[in-house]
């Protein structure tokens, strides 16, 4: 988990500008990105090839992925929040989506490196930071524009939390695909 946080903080340090675009080969330049790019870059820092893992999971389980329109597209499938949500539901540990300020038991479930997703209309994905408010609520590492940042937005993002995951779930099949 520490490697995921370090990767997310590195992304924040680089300050890529928010730019939603389609890229041949799938990967945007280092100075551009969206919320999903923070996730795959942080996981890459931790030694995982999220694109390869998602491409393989989609190949084997296409019907489970709602954002695989008109067939698979490895250039974009791993950069869609809904696809990442399905992947983390399948290969991560699902945790509480409730956040209670000043509640030690509740907040102990929100660990640095966890992944959090948010609903439409402001669909989003972020990493839980190791930085916390005085009441214990963690900050998030994300790119919601204009650049990647570490912010106190877990409870103030304009859409509700839809998922909270710890990755990896340490099963043999997934670890074989880790880079």
Image (cartoon, rainbow, N blue to C red):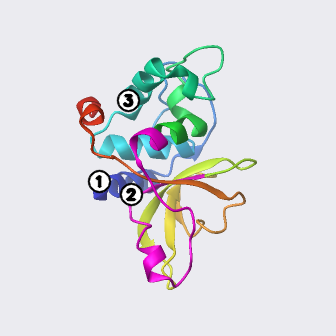
- Counting residues from the start of the chain, the first of labels 3 and 2 encountered is 3
Say which quarter of the image contains residue 90. top left
| Residue at numbered disc 2 | 113
Q: Percent from the top left, x then y, of residue 21?
A: 62, 30
Asked if residue 61 is positioned above or below residue 136 in the image, the reply reads above
**How far apart are the alpha carbons under marks 3 and 2?**
18 Å
Badge 2 density bin: few <14, some 14–19, many ≥20, Cα 10 Å: many
Task: Tell me what residue is drawn at x 44 percent, y 19 percent.
Answer: 60
Which mark, by number, is residue 53?
3
Name the front one of labels 1 and 3: 3
The local secondary structure at tag 3 comes to: helix
Q: Percent from the top left, x then y, of residue 10?
A: 38, 53
Asked whether residue 59 is drawn in magenta, I would say no
Q: Are the two marked residues, 2 and 1, in contact with CB atoms closer than 8 angstroms?
A: yes
| Residue at numbered disc 1 | 3
- Counting residues from the start of the chain, the first of labels 2 and 1 encountered is 1
Which mark, by number, is residue 102?
none
Name the front one of labels 2 and 1: 2
* Range covered by the magenta-colored residues: 88-117
Badge 1 density bin: few <14, some 14–19, many ≥20, Cα 10 Å: some
The local secondary structure at tag 1 comes to: helix
In what quadrant of the picture does the N terminus appear?
bottom left
């Amino acid at each position: 988990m520490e490697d995921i946080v370090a990767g997310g903080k590195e992304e924040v340090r680089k300050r890529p500008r928010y730019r939603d675009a389609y890229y041949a080969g799938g990967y945007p330049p280092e100075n551009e990105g969206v919320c999903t790019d923070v996730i795959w870059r942080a996981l890459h820092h931790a030694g995982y090839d999220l694109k390869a893992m998602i491409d393989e999971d989609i190949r084997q389980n296409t019907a489970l992925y709602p954002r695989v329109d008109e067939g698979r597209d490895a250039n974009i499938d791993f950069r869609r929040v809904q696809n990442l949500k399905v992947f983390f539901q399948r290969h991560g540990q699902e945790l509480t989506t409730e956040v209670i300020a000043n509640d030690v038991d509740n907040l102990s479930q929100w660990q640095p490196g966890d992944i959090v997703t948010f609903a439409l209309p402001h669909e989003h994905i972020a990493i839980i930071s190791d930085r916390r408010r005085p009441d214990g609520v963690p900050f998030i590492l994300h790119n919601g524009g204009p650049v990647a940042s570490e912010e106190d937005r877990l409870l103030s993002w304009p859409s509700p939390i839809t998922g909270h995951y710890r990755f990896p779930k340490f099963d043999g099949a997934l670890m074989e695909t880790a880079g």
